[in-house]
Amino acid sequence: MPDQPVIYSASLLMPVSGPVIHDGAVLVREGRIESVGTISDLERDNPAAEARHFPQHTIVPGAVNAHAHLGFRHGDAPEGGSFSNWLAGLIARLPEKEAWTAEAARNSAREAIETGTTFMAESSPYGECLPQLAESGMVGTVYAEFFPGDYEEASPEEISNSIVQKVSELRKGLPERVDCQISVHSQYTVDPESSRLAARRARDLGWGLAVHVSESPEEVEFVRDGTGGLTDIFGSNGWGGTGLSPVRYAESIELLAPGTIAAHLATAVSEEDIEVLARTGAAAAHCPRSNEFLNCGVSPVPLMMERGVRVGMGTDGLWSSPSMNLFEETLFAVKLHGFDGATGLELATLGGAGALGIGNETGSLENGKWADLAVVDVLPASGDPAREALEAAAGGGVAATVAGGRLIYNRAES
Ligand SMILES: [Zn+2]
């Protein structure tokens, strides 16, 4: 017997892709939105549907987190100061971290859900946080990072084959809409040939690719000059000093393509770099709170958007970011760049979906898309209702979260 259709409704509905609807509703059948309209129209036309009404609330699309790490926790982040100082602290604690990574991933996923996130693009070593994402109720992609330094005496061909094999195995038996793909972690941890081969294999298989690009001043220095704090950590990495910017270098080793989500792009991203991103079709994940914590600068997101680069928002992980609340991350970006609320709400939802290449499946409340939505405890009264919804969601005002038509969080029942 097919699932009974459900009508989710609230005093206000913000589809993002269209005008707001007062007393708005979506009709959901088998996980997807069958129609969007007013409560009275949808209830009249679908008397058999189960009705879930949230009076004095606003329904928005679920947040799409375009770059995150689930396996970190609150309270004991390594010291910031500089990126290389923080990274050295993180690496020193990897052995002890093994004991609690799974629990941290469960908690991070829970926090994301309770703050309205429905789609999570997660990166973790060898996809270690995939089980926790898969069991969370959220949907999303885990990008499995690989580190050639972990492989003894292996060639780039063997290393890229190994990660493709590993990801192929991880992809088996996953819930619907949970996926595993590859991440080339960074330009200072993965050698150029392994990067190039892994990226090519990913494209051949129709998989996306996640990379960290131009995150820190030290990364810029490593790639350009082969010196600096990251060279001190990864002293044996002889491929730095290319004379290129990280974006140009990423292009030269074939990392940039329409299926690529490039995280951060915070330090020293020039107009020429933005042209490269636009020309190659690579998308950006903007993580401004992590960038601030690690003194990495401000990503030129307004100019990227102007030049047609697809941009989504990412929280990064809890060792560089204060929360897994994507709406809070987005409100920070709204203030940083002077965006209006509508631009912010779009970045948090449809922008992220577009950046990840799934803008026809989620990110807005439209017929045929998956019913991924958040119910926010606010009834906007100002001239910028999207900003009010964003502020409420950023401040803990998410009352319920629905992914693929399933209520995965309901504050009233928890
Ligand atoms: Zn990251």
Image (cartoon, rainbow, N blue to C red):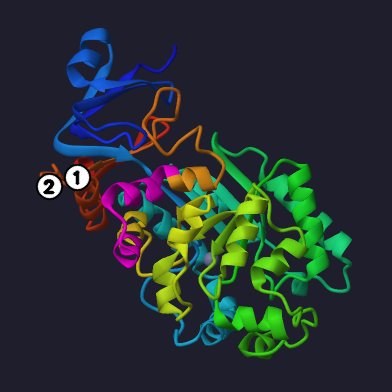
Vertical position of residue 244 compared to residue 405: above or below: below
Q: Secondary structure at mark 2?
A: loop
Which mark is drawn over residue 382? 2
Image location (x, y in percent) of residue 121: 52, 52
Q: Report crowding for label 2: few under 14, some 14 to 19, many 20 or more residues within 10 A (C-alpha).
A: few
Marks 1 and 2 in Cβ contact (< 8 Å): yes
Q: Report crowding for label 1: few under 14, some 14 to 19, many 20 or more residues within 10 A (C-alpha).
A: many
Residue 132 in sight from this viewpoint: no
Vertical position of residue 293 compared to residue 386: above or below: below
Residue 348 magenta: yes
What residue appears at the point 45 percent right and 73 percent down from the top-left corner? 291
Which mark is drawn over residue 342? none
Residue 299 magenta: no
Q: Amino acid at mark 2?
A: Ser
Q: Quadrant of residue 45?
A: top left
Q: Secondary structure at mark 1?
A: helix
Question: Quarter of the image containing the N terminus?
Answer: top left
Q: Which residues, given as a range, are shown in magenta?
A: 332-350
